[in-house]
Amino acid sequence: MVPVGFGHAFMTLEPGTEICYKVDDYYSPDCDGAIRWDCPDIAIEWPLSGPAVLSEKDAALPTLCGFESPFAYDGMPMHLARIE
């Protein structure tokens, strides 16, 4: 389970793949936030065999340094937070 507000990403390795996932509420643009998939601050080595295919929205995302989170952070590290 991915906690609310926790960054996550999906990458498909086969053409025509569809991804479905369950969320905890209806989509709210005011709570939408994301960072670039190829952010140099995070430096994930994606196993690409060609160029990434992105939506216009995903192609325009900020890096981690430029991200303004829509979520409040109370300073408690995730591993100590109570997840219900």
Image (cartoon, rainbow, N blue to C red):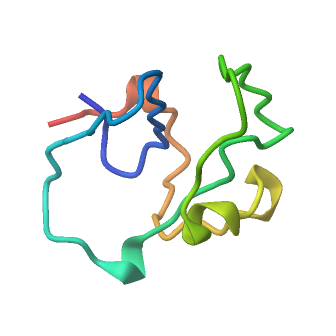
Q: Which x, y percent locates residue 36?
A: 69, 52
**Residue drawn at (33%, 36%) of the image:** 16
Is residue 22 found left or right of 14 in the rendered image? Answer: left
The quarter holding residue 25 reads: bottom left
Position above or below: 67 against 43: below
Q: Residue furthest bottom?
A: 30
Asked whether 50 or 69 is in front, the reply is 50
Q: Residue furthest front?
A: 15
Position above or below: 37 against 17: below
Quadrant of the image for the C terminus? top left
Asked whether 6 or 80 is in front, the reply is 6
The quarter holding residue 55 reads: bottom right
**Residue drawn at (46%, 64%) of the image:** 71
Position above or below: 82 against 34: above
Q: Which x, y percent locates residue 52?
A: 66, 41
Asked whether 17 or 31 is in front, the reply is 17
Q: Which x, y percent locates residue 58?
A: 59, 61
